[in-house]
Image (cartoon, rainbow, N blue to C red):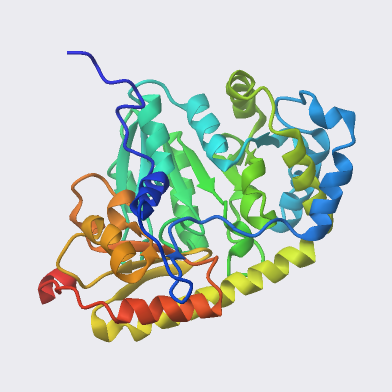
Amino acid sequence: MIKPTRTQATFTPPVPEARRWLDGLSFPPQRPLLNVSQAAPVDPPPAPLRRALAEAMERPELHLYGPVLGLPALREELAANWSAHYGTPISAAEVAITAGCNQAFAATIAALCGEGDEVLLPTPWYFNHRMWLDMQGVTTVPLPTDDGLLPRAETARALVTDRTRAIVLVSPNNPGGVEYPPEIMTELYDLAREKGLRLIVDETYRDFDSRSGAPHDLLSREGREDTLVQLYSFSKSYRLTGHRVGAIVTGTGLLEEVEKFLDTVTICPPQVGQYAALWGLQNLGPWVAGERSEILARGRAVADGFRKLETKGWTLRGCGAYFAYVRHPFAESSATLAPKLVRDAGILTLPGTMFMPEGDADGARHFRFAFANLDEAGITALFERLGALDWPLAARTDAA
């Protein structure tokens, strides 16, 4: 029997799979599709950034290979931004620019793990993290979270073996929406340092955290050069999803290994996107603050809407940044209901089964709603349509 390839060993990408549910369907103008399946801005970057990019396209160097770890000016600017935000000085040598945050994760795992090594991934997880671990031959060890969708150090400790190489966190969380309290992150950091592991903290949605100031103090802790790896994305903050610009912030020793991966895969991050990120860091602080306020307002409206649906059996498990993670009241699995939701209610969302280990019953009870692209009218329509669903309900003990 032929052994499956690494890509065959993992699952179909969830977002493209969900888009196929739209095939053959049409949605009238008076009842348009509500697409809450993907956490990506649909609007273009702000006009000043687009103008700056148009001018920059005349620069010859933007059309050539650049440094493997990114433009020095961008690395320096992000180091200064990170230092100010976290209250701890870091240098440009501790920053690498990548072709998006997914590549930042991929490069980090490639630099840290070998065949058969293990990585702890809290559930529900970001599906692309699981997919890359599969494709690297790295074993994903599910790290169950508590009732508040928070990973706990005592739970993680019981899962660590001599093959464990890292613990991965995403905060604000995708898909859960929750913001990890600093004390939980500190406990997991201490565990990682004690066991000689890396704590990988994906902070893609950092700019939409509801808390002011630094969300944790891990950068100031002893041993962080050999323990902490922070990942970041410019995609959401400046609407640069198509330009693919992300970053890794960690010790220089690990970045030497990361450089080997990046040189082999992309040679350099996209030059135009890097310039856009640099210009954004230098000029768009107030604009990003306005975007944050709008997203937080939408999150509050979504949280309020799901609380109003509690009488119909819905339960809000987490809400923040771009996401709401909710338990539904229906008898069938969310994997069955998600395509049905498109047909019956004109809502495209992802089932919890896409964020959990195969066969995990908890995934069947949940949906993730990515609400950042919904305006006030869209939010109102979402809850009107959800409230009108008359599908068979689960038994009371099943829905609890």
Q: Residue furthest top?
A: 1
The N terminus - image quarter: top left
Q: Would residue 156 be found to the left or right of residue 69 on screen?
A: left
- For the point 55% across and 66% down, the residue is 373
| Residue 261 horizontal/vertical position (percent) | 57, 22
Q: Would residue 294 be found to the left or right of residue 160 on screen?
A: right
| Residue 305 horizontal/vertical position (percent) | 41, 81
Q: Is residue 63 visible?
A: yes
The C terminus - image quarter: bottom left
| Residue nearer the viewer, 21 or 225 | 21
| Residue nearer the viewer, 187 or 298 | 298
Q: Is residue 386 above or below residue 95?
A: below
Q: Can residue 164 be seen in this view?
A: no
| Residue 175 horizontal/vertical position (percent) | 42, 57
- For the point 71% across and 68% down, the residue is 289
| Residue 292 horizontal/vertical position (percent) | 65, 68
- Where residue 249 sits, quadrant-wise, is top right
| Residue nearer the viewer, 107 or 221 | 107
| Residue nearer the viewer, 294 or 164 | 294
Q: Is residue 237 above or below residue 252?
A: below
The total number of labels drawn is 0
- For the point 77% across and 26% down, the residue is 66
